[in-house]
Amino acid sequence: MIQERTIVALATPAGAGAIAIIRVSGKEAIPISASVFRSVRNKTLEKQKSHTVHLGHIMDGERTLDEVLLSLFKGPNSYTGEDVVEISCHGSPYIQQQIIQLLLRQGCRMADAGEFTLRAFLNGKLDLSQAEAVADLIASDNEASHQIAMQQMRGGFSNEIKLLRDELLNFASLIELELDFSEEDVEFADRGQFKALLAKIQDVLKRLIDSFAVGNVIKNGIPIAIVGEPNVGKSTLLNALLNEERAIVSNIAGTTRDTIEDEISIGGLGFRFIDTAGLRATEDTIEQLGIQKTLEKIEQAQVILYLMDVSSVVKDGVLNQKKIEDFGSEIKKIGKKHPTKPLIVVANKIDALPLPMLNTIEERLVTISTRLAHSFPVMLSAKTGAGVDALKTGLLNFVHTGALKNNETIVTNTRHYDALIKALEEVDKVQLGMANSVPSDLLAIDIRQALYHFGEITGEITNDDLLGNIFANFCIGK
């Protein structure tokens, strides 16, 4: 946490590349950089304006290490709020290390993980939730997670919290003032307005808490369990969705003994597909363990893809009504056991049947699906890829992203979620106290606790352990 020392780190990924950026921040960033930089135009670095770029060479004594571009950012108008120098050098790992070691010898120390962003927070350039959004932005691997991180980094979430905290703090001040005049029995805080404010805060907190269910799956990938009997094409479907041979495909029933997971982006959202062991009665101990894992993955999944082999309902060119009814019973059983989860009935291997039969089967599946909430059928061939795009469209339609489309605040951070729940508990206590005419001094205690939890989110209230845990997860150089 000590900011007296000037820090240095590689800000670009380690390894060879076209260029690398070495970042220096602190009180001595400019003098130390100037001591090893020789401008091609003999410029004195300390005299140059902020936000300027200079061409020159990094010199170790009379030895030239590299020709570089040096970018100058003078505090407080920099990312960290301190003087910052960024050296763009050639991307040789040898050159990178030579320059960093030279700067260390001149008085810098190596930056800790996330220390540049930590200094930005400590210098008031970012609040804590915005600083955490920086890590989320770096980790974002699809459009939705990128959008949420950008919205939070721009202060969307923290602005909502700050507004609520300021309004609650205003009333808290008035109630605290009443305590100073307790003998006069006066009320400075309008109780009617205070009740309205508490109701407003409760509504906002509940909305933010509820958004975590969406935000968490968007951040970590929406889990989709692919289930069904053995040898119906689950692994083939996974390969078709991923467009690669991710899972072993075989005509032998029970090939998949364990779950196989992989993630792709569809329409800007991350979907984590889980290929599971086939559901059937078996004496094979290993396969039984795989089936048990399948049942566990169904519980964890947000969406269930139930895969059936349409060719199996035809025998000697005639539809097997009993087989269709068996599929219908299995679909209903899964739907009733998981009534809140979207269930997509995927009729696979349509390339094996003529169109009239497919139409009849689809009609039956539509009838079965309409009797269940959140269910619909998709006809496809995982082997040829026909209908796979329709399945992807169906997945997007099932996922609730209204808040995302409306640019509403979505909570994705577990720490924020926990603080919001605790803040709501304290606000509920205040509301209950108001209803029971609790004295102002007791109300003030619960209000202070609610303000404390609001402050935990934005960083008005922090400790070294909290900051250490947060920034330890950052990459070095950011």
Image: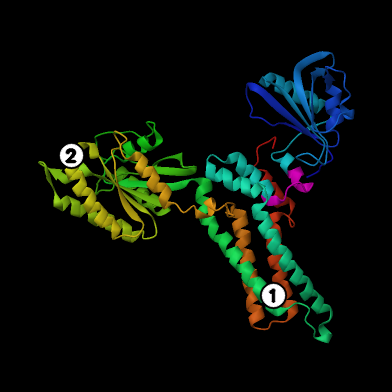
Asked which quadrant contains residue 393, the reply is top left
**Quadrant (top left, top right, bottom left, bottom right) of the N terminus:** top right
Nearest the viewer among 214 and 247 is 214
Q: Which residue is mark 1?
A: 194
Q: Is residue 204 left or right of residue 25?
A: left
Expressed as whole percent of the image width and height from the top left, the position of residue 239 reads: 36, 35
Amino acid type indicated by mark 2: Pro
Which segment is the magenta one? Answer: 118-129
Q: Which residue is mark 2?
A: 354
Expressed as whole percent of the image width and height from the top left, the position of residue 282 reads: 24, 47
Above or below, 236 against 345 in this view is above
SS under mark 2 = loop
Asked which quadrant contains residue 108, the reply is top right
Asked which quadrant contains residue 3, the reply is top right
Disc 1 crowd, CA 10 A, few/some/many (<14, 14-19, 20+): some
At x 39%, y 31%, the residue is 244
Does the stretch in magenta take in 41? no
Nearest the viewer among 116 and 289 is 116
